[in-house]
Image (spheres, helix red, strand yellow):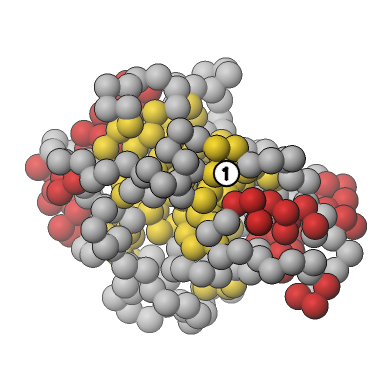
Amino acid sequence: MKLNYLPLASALFALSVPSLAPAQQTAARPAITGISHLTLFADDIPKSKQFYASLLGWDPIPSSGTQSGIRFYANHSQYVELITPATPGGAERLDSVGFSTSNADALRKYLGANGVAVPKTVSVEKNGDRSFLVHDPEGNKVSFVQEGSHPPVAPKSASEEVSNHIMHAGYVVRDRAALDHFYKDLLGFHLYWQGGNPDTQVNWVMMQVPNGTDWIEYMLLLPATPSRGQLGSADHLAPGVTSVAELQARLEKRGWKPADNKNPQILGVDGKMQLDLHDPDGTRVEFMEFKPVKEACCSAYTGVQPSPTPGW
């Protein structure tokens, strides 16, 4: 992802959208219902397949694939896609984040009418998925996907999944106001929770989709030139679980062990238990319980809490 925030880019974005007030928007915005996928760079896809398929239990499509573009499905509509970077070993491992929408073409027209650069048409995949890609004010790639008529069917191994719901994604943000124009004013996301450590500052801002329970997390206050480790932690995905204790037990049965024999279960300042893993390229996979176990620090939740995906 593009990480160096350019004030000029945000200024041009703001100028291209003279008013984002609902009364002046030219068309109704189609529903945006949740996280669709994350596309990540992987230097060694066969090695990454061991992590996502064997450890997490997410079904790979194609099942025998080890090439760029392989997808690991948490459910019929959410997945992690791995692609080969142009230059291996780079610090940035997140290529793009995708959201689900009820009507991709209508959303493309809506964003175009409100000053966002959009492609001339949507792309159509073999399974019928319709999608398009835009850039947020800081240059990060964001896609919107309308599910097709032929989604993948539940694999026989579905019961082996450690989570069947990717409930949020996060990435580095430099200019909160600029991102709020995009996510809040244009797309209808709302503030779900915000907080920091110490509680006198805001490090993390959760913006919930307008028609669902998933969210995008702004990762604020990183150094101007983050290390690969810092980027891998900030640019992340978060599968939901009912219990991180049960998650740990399942992972250990598959051969995983906590680092330095320390307790990997952490109570976040948002009041939810979590357990962090990192894939072979350093991207953080932040397993988080769906429900808080104590009152959140810093601010109250403003939206409905997520839950496991019904069925698959």
**Above-or-below relation of 310 to 128:** below
Please indicate whether residue 222 sits to the left or right of residue 198 in the image.
right
Type of residue at label 1? Ser
Which quarter of the figure has residue 185? bottom right
Q: Nearer the viewer, residue 239 or 209?
A: 209
How far across and down, in percent of the image, does residue 124 sit?
55, 37
Which quarter of the figure has residue 281? top left
**Above-or-below relation of 8 to 14:** above
Please indicate whether residue 9 sits to the left or right of residue 82 in the image.
right
Any part of residue 97 in sight: no
Please indicate whether residue 214 sits to the left or right of residue 292 in the image.
right
Query: For the point 21% across and 63% down, which residue is it?
Result: 243
How far across and down, in percent of the image, does residue 181 sit?
74, 64
Label 1 packing within 10 angstroms: few (<14), some (14-19), many (20+): many
**Above-or-below relation of 113 to 5:** below
Query: For the point 47% across and 41% down, which residue is it?
Result: 128
According to the picture, the residue beneath numbered tag 1 turns out to be: 131
Q: Nearer the viewer, residue 55 or 77?
A: 77
Q: Nearer the viewer, residue 225 or 59?
A: 59
